[in-house]
């Protein structure tokens, strides 16, 4: 993939950093990076052809640094399909982080709670996902150097990584739900009927990111895990309209706990998975 190779070479001119894991920060988690040992930051704008986010609250840069001993590349801000980029473009950054050396991809996001047992502020580890009315990022000619034409998706969120995160949450006494995340295009929030559909499909949370990223990462053999912050109950469940400010308020409120869960999980992944 030409554009991918060009961007990779572009980045390599700016840093030789070799991440072992990649972390994508969703809404409200944007400050996580302020607590790690930073080696280098790179604004997306400095990378020729890189898709740049237009959403308020989403910064746009790669941060290279260490969470304890783990070398990570962090995406502070992601781009979404609804911004007008193709799925191929949306997932380019994931592929880049894979090319840089990340073997594990840790995805985070804000989402709406579909499961009636959830409430705003809950954390949900992603057990599996449903790609719903969005195109696959793998459509188009397949780059065999990245992965196969028909990749397996039978353990999209690696079961060993999930076990490590589950144990970390327990040890930290941070309540953690587990469920299925469903991605729609957005940018409009869903209708109550669409949320009933999502529930009938077996979804526990809905959002506008993550699934396409997990597909691109699985394609190239990265091991994926993810945690969703339930920032609001989905449409039609509570007697109030949904708003981006509610999403941000909840994310801000639980951010310190979320950051601790992600940081401790990454440390455990370093010791028990990457070097276990
Ligand atoms: N729907 C879709 N995406 C979201 C939501 C929601 O309710 N909350 C946060 N991201």
Image (spheres, grey):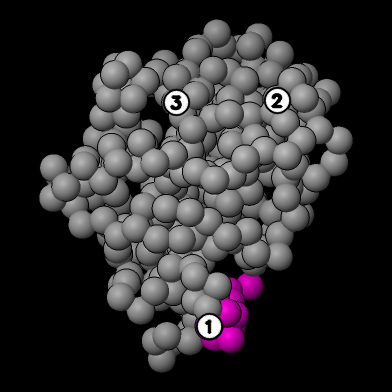
Q: Locate the N terminus and report the quarter of the image it occupies.
A: top right
Residues at marks 2 and 3, CA–CA distance in whole angstroms: 17 Å
Judge depth for marks 2 and 3 and give the one in front: 2
| Residue 200 colored in magenta in the image | no
Residues at marks 1 and 2, CA–CA distance in whole angstroms: 37 Å
Question: In this figure, what is the number of numbered marks?
Answer: 3
Residue 5: mark? none
* Residue in view at x 50 percent, y 13 percent: 18
Mark 2 and 3 residues: CB-CB less than 8 Å, in contact?
no
User: Which secondary structure, mark 2?
Assistant: loop
* Residue in view at x 32 percent, y 29 percent: 269
Give neighbour class at mark 1: few <14, some 14-19, many 20+ (Cα, 10 Å): some
Give neighbour class at mark 3: few <14, some 14-19, many 20+ (Cα, 10 Å): many
Residue 21: mark? 3
Residue 196: mark? 1
Task: Answer with left or right where residue 98 lies relative to residue 272.
Answer: right
User: Which secondary structure, mark 1?
Assistant: helix
Task: Answer with left or right where residue 273 lies relative to residue 128.
Answer: left
Comes first in the chain, label 1 or label 3: 3
| Residue 196 colored in magenta in the image | yes
Is any atom of residue 243 visible in this view?
no
Which of 48 and 12 lies nearest the eye of the viewer? 12
Comes first in the chain, label 1 or label 2: 2
Is any atom of residue 129 visible in this view?
yes
User: How far across and how far down the image is residue 168, in percent?
Assistant: 21, 40
Comes first in the chain, label 2 or label 3: 3
Task: Answer with left or right where residue 54 lies relative to residue 33.
Answer: right
Q: Residue furthest bottom?
A: 239
- For the magenta stretch, what is the residue range? 187-197
Measured along the vertical axis of the image, is residue 38 above or below residue 150? above
Q: Which residue is mark 2?
A: 146
Q: Locate the C terminus and report the quarter of the image it occupies.
A: top left
């Amino acid at each position: 993939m030409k554009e991918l190779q060009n961007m990779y070479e572009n980045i390599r001119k700016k840093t030789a950093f070799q991440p072992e894991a990649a972390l994508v920060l969703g809404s409200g988690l944007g400050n996580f990076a302020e607590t790690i040992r930073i080696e280098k930051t790179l604004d997306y704008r400095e990378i020729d052809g890189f898709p740049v986010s237009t959403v308020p609250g989403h910064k746009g840069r790669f941060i290279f640094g260490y969470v304890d001993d783990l070398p990570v590349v962090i995406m502070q801000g992601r781009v979404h399909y609804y911004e007008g980029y193709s799925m191929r473009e949306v997932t380019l950054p994931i592929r880049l982080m894979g090319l840089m050396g990340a073997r594990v991809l840790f995805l985070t996001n804000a989402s709406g709670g579909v499961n009636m047992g959830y409430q705003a502020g809950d954390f949900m580890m992603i057990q599996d996902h449903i790609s719903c009315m969005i195109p696959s990022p793998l459509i188009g000619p397949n780059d065999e150097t990245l992965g196969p034409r028909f990749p397996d998706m039978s353990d999209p969120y690696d079961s060993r990584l999930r076990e490590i995160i589950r144990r970390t949450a327990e040890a930290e006494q941070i309540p953690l739900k587990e469920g299925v995340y469903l991605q729609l295009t957005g940018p409009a929030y869903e209708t109550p009927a669409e949320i009933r559909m999502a529930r009938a499909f077996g979804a526990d949370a809905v959002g506008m990111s993550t699934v396409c990223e997990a597909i691109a990462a699985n394609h190239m053999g990265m091991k994926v895990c993810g945690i969703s912050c339930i920032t609001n109950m989905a449409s039609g469940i509570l007697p109030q309209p949904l708003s981006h400010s509610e999403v941000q308020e909840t994310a801000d409120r639980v951010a310190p706990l979320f950051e601790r869960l992600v940081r401790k999980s990454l440390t455990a992944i370093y010791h028990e998975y990457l070097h276990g």
